[in-house]
């Protein structure tokens, strides 16, 4: 199994962080479930703004303007979160794992595959229902920039693929 984007190349926002001798094996966005809270906030705020507007009526225009501006702030925050999600990627190359995040301030967390001593994944009940999990990596007692990767789609498949790269079979070179 090879999970890469169409055209067998990482997105431009990720490609600039790959070394010339690396080839990517996995490139995925984090699961859209990462947007559940912002969606709930926008819809909850819309319902609350509608109820408050209905109760206040048209008598208090200043309060109505404040209510709807507050909801607009929630909507703008939601659009920002979606834009951030669209550029966040988890990438596994032949040499290392990368997690790129951030829209304006770009963060790239990295861990060499050779440094990973243990890897596990966790799935909450909601994660099982929606199809996401969290990777937890450890490396020889050191504190690493990339320790957890939440909201990973296809966690079982990716876990097996990454573990196969970290801990290769002794038979891999004997064909």
Image (cartoon, rainbow, N blue to C red):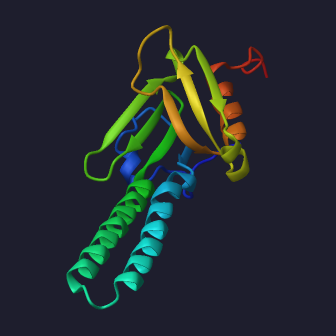
Q: Residue 98: percent from the left, percent from the top?
A: 45, 35
108 to 82, vertically: above or below: above
Outermost residue toward the left in this view = 62
Q: Nearer the viewer, residue 97 or 41?
A: 41
Assign the C terminus to one quadrant of the image. top right
Q: Nearer the viewer, residue 56 or 66?
A: 56
Q: Is residue 124 left or right of residue 90?
A: right
Q: Quadrant of the N terminus?
A: top right
Q: Percent position (x, y) of residue 69?
A: 27, 74
Quadrant assignment, res 59: bottom left
Of residues 30 and 63, the one drawn nearer to the viewer in this rendering: 63
Residue visible at 23% across and 86% down?
A: 61
Can you say whether 155 is above or below 171 in the image? below
Residue 96 in view (yes/no)? no
Considering only vertical position in the picture, is 102 above or below 169?
A: below
Q: Residue at x 67, y 33 (%)?
A: 159
- Image coordinates of residue 31 in percent, x first then y, are 57, 51
Q: Residue at x 50, y 42 (%)?
A: 90
Residue 66 point in image, percent of width and height: 24, 74
The residue closer to the viewer here, 40 or 157, is: 40
- Can residue 45 be seen in this snapshot? yes
Q: Residue at x 44, y 58 (%)?
A: 86
């Amino acid at each position: 199994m090879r999970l890469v984007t169409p055209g067998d190349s990482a997105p431009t926002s990720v490609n600039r962080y790959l070394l010339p001798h690396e080839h990517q094996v996995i490139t995925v966005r984090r699961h859209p479930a990462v947007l559940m809270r912002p969606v709930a906030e926008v819809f909850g705020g819309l319902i609350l703004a509608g109820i408050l507007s209905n109760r206040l009526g048209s008598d208090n225009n200043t309060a109505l303007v404040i209510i709807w501006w507050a909801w607009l702030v929630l909507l703008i925050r939601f659009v920002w979160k979606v834009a951030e999600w669209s550029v966040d990627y988890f990438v596994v190359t032949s040499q290392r794992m990368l997690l790129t995040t951030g829209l304006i301030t770009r963060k790239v967390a990295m861990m060499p595959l050779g440094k990973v001593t243990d890897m596990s994944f966790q799935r909450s009940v909601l994660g099982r229902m929606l199809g996401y999990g969290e990777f937890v990596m450890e490396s020889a007692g050191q504190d690493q920039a990339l320790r957890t990767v939440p909201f990973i789609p296809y966690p079982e498949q990716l876990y097996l693929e990454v573990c196969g790269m970290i801990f290769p079979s002794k038979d891999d070179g004997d064909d």
